[in-house]
Image (cartoon, rainbow, N blue to C red):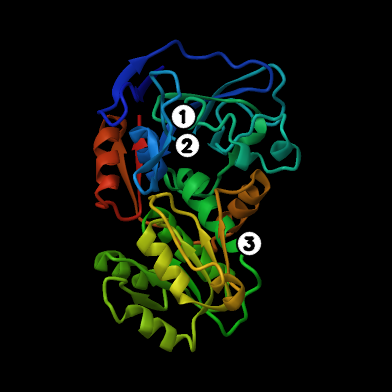
Amino acid sequence: MKSHSVTAYGEALTETTNDTPAPQGSEVLVRVSHCGVCHSDVHFHDGHFDLGGGNKLDLTKKPMPFTLGHEIEGIVEAIGPDVTGVKVGERRVVYPWIGCGDCAMCNRDDEHLCNGRALGVNLPGGFSTHCLVPHERYCIDCDGIAEGLASTYMCSGITAYSALKYFKPISPDEDVLIVGLGGVGMMAVQFALAMFERPPLVADIDENKLQAALGAGAARAYNPKDPEALKQLLKDTNGGVPAAADFVGAEGSLNFANGAIRKGGEVRIVGLFGGGFASPIPLFPLRGISIAGSMTGSLDDTIEMMELVKAGKINPIPVEQRGMEEASRTLDDLREGRILGRVVLTP
């Protein structure tokens, strides 16, 4: 088994070689055919999240070397003796947000909030020729979905879908706002087109991404670098939107999303770019607003989402395939905002 692994935080990945694991019990060994590269991989590669004010959340407790990659697609190569629903040779995508299996979050079916055994986060991931999946239930059928594209739904897809699904009900005559048009934000545009009566509004500081989103079906686009953008959005929406999803998670993006919602509106923060946010506390009750976090989604949500995709209701985002040896360059490109859509690595 060959992997491209973190051996020093922030440094180029190193090719490592290990014995290919043999699945036990209900485990499944997947030969990786594609693995998407997510912006959270950049944070895990750097070894921290930016908490603002010079503070960082330390992510450097993992034993080295460590293999990133949580958008995993491949062919089942071997199965444990207790596996009954997955067969060798089948093409599957892998739900990576796996909990410890023995905590309050896991017991209430919120294992994606536990992430104790998340692939590419706490267990070795898909920047590799093989990935060992802890249980067969995490190997999801993806027949009918283009190779490579299917992998992106395991993070970009479920993260976008879950954030939008749990908005409070949206009136048919109101708009939702998507802030940030990276891989997850562009995926959210496609889900919004299928889930709401009206096409979404979008915001980003990159004009190329704004044009791409408009071409993909967004109704109107706003660049927060334009000092008149927020004023124009409030005018266009007669006072603001009922819901906004921030797929950047930076101070500027959250301020724009917060300014764009009407009284009684909500913001869901999805992105992990980092920084701080401050607001006068009385404005929360006076405006009747809510600001909440949204992290990936449950296994049930993922299976539900995949049925929507297989039904042909979600248009594909742009996907660029690169060799696994380009993993380090891809992480650097993500850092610098040079990627439109998603890059998927192939061993």
Q: Please say if 66 is above or below 258.
A: above
Residue at the far top: name it.
Answer: 19
Disc 2 is placed on an element classified as: loop
Relative to 66, is 103 on the left or the right?
right
Residue depicted at x 70% and y 30%: 101
Q: Are marks 2 and 3 in contact (CB under 8 Å)?
A: no
Q: For residue 172, say whether it is visible.
A: yes
Disc on the earlier residue, 2 or 3: 2
Q: How many marks?
A: 3
**Label annotation for residue 125:** 1
**Place of residue 47 in the rendered image (x, y in percent of width and height, measured from the top left):** 37, 32
Q: Report, in whole angstroms, how far the alpha carbon at label 1 lies from the one at label 2.
A: 6 Å
Q: Amino acid at mark 1?
A: Gly
Q: Please say if 56 is above or below 232.
A: above
Q: Nearer the viewer, residue 288 or 12?
A: 288
Q: For residue 179, say whether it is visible.
A: no
Residue occupied by mark 2:
70
Q: Residues within 10 Å of mark 3 (few under 14, many from 20)?
A: few
Relative to 335, is 34 on the left or the right?
right
Residue depicted at x 49% and y 55%: 270
In terms of image quadrants, where is residue 35? Answer: top left
Nearer the observer, disc 1 or disc 3? 3
Q: Please say if 299 is above or below 103.
A: below
**Label annotation for residue 11:** none
Q: Report, in whole angstroms, how far the alpha carbon at label 2 lies from the one at label 3.
A: 23 Å
Disc on the earlier residue, 1 or 2: 2
Q: Amino acid at mark 2?
A: His
Residue occupied by mark 3:
166
Q: Nearer the viewer, residue 89 or 345?
A: 345
Relative to 347, is 175 on the left or the right?
right
Q: Are marks 1 and 2 in contact (CB under 8 Å)?
A: yes
Nearer the observer, disc 2 or disc 3? 3
